[in-house]
Amino acid sequence: MDDRRARELVADERRRVEAAIRRLLGDLWAERLLERQQTGESDSTGSELAVEMVDRALLTDLRAQLSAVVRAEERIAAGTFGLSVDSGLAIPDERLEAAPLGERTVEEQQRRDEGDGEQTPWSTNLPT
């Protein structure tokens, strides 16, 4: 994959992740304001807590994706984007088009996921 296309794909991912983080942080901020304005007991306290826990989990995942964006940008700058961080093997362009933040070949990622259980939503079920 040429550098121009790699930069374009990773920049698109950065915009997507940063926009999702902004939306989620805005939602969390709005929920906190609403909580402060409410008086008395709320019947939905349990469900509000569950929603906040989900939002925080989503925020953690989005921050991990943003870290992956930074690593991809670093690989582009170093001239190693498109090469596995484990083996140095070329990652097929089709995989990078589908998952620009991919750091390994599909086979390497599958072995990693099966080996230590670490799995990210953007690293699975990708074309080879």
Image: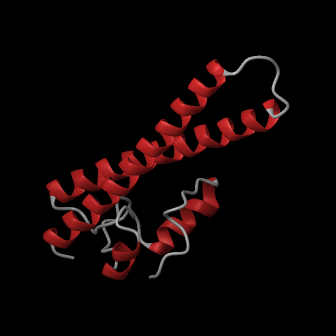
Name the quadrant containing residue 4.
bottom left
Taking the spot 37% from the left edge, 57% from the top edge, the residue there is: 16
Q: Quadrant of residue 9?
A: bottom left
Q: Quadrant of residue 90?
A: bottom left
Q: Where in the figure is residue 43, as x and y percent of width and height?
A: 85, 31
User: What residue sits 28% from the left and 69% below the top?
Assistant: 82
- Classify residue 20 as left or right of residue 42: left
Q: Residue at x 30, y 48 (%)?
A: 70
- Which sits in the foreground, 54 or 106? 54
In depth, the one of 43 and 124 nearer the eye is: 43
Colouring used for the render = secondary structure
Residue, far right: 43
Could you tell me residue 29's position as x and y percent?
52, 30
Residue 7 in percent (x, y) is at 20, 63
Residue 74 appears at what percent x and percent y?
22, 51
Q: Is residue 87 above or below residue 54?
A: below
Horizontal side of residue 128 vs 84, given as left or right:
right
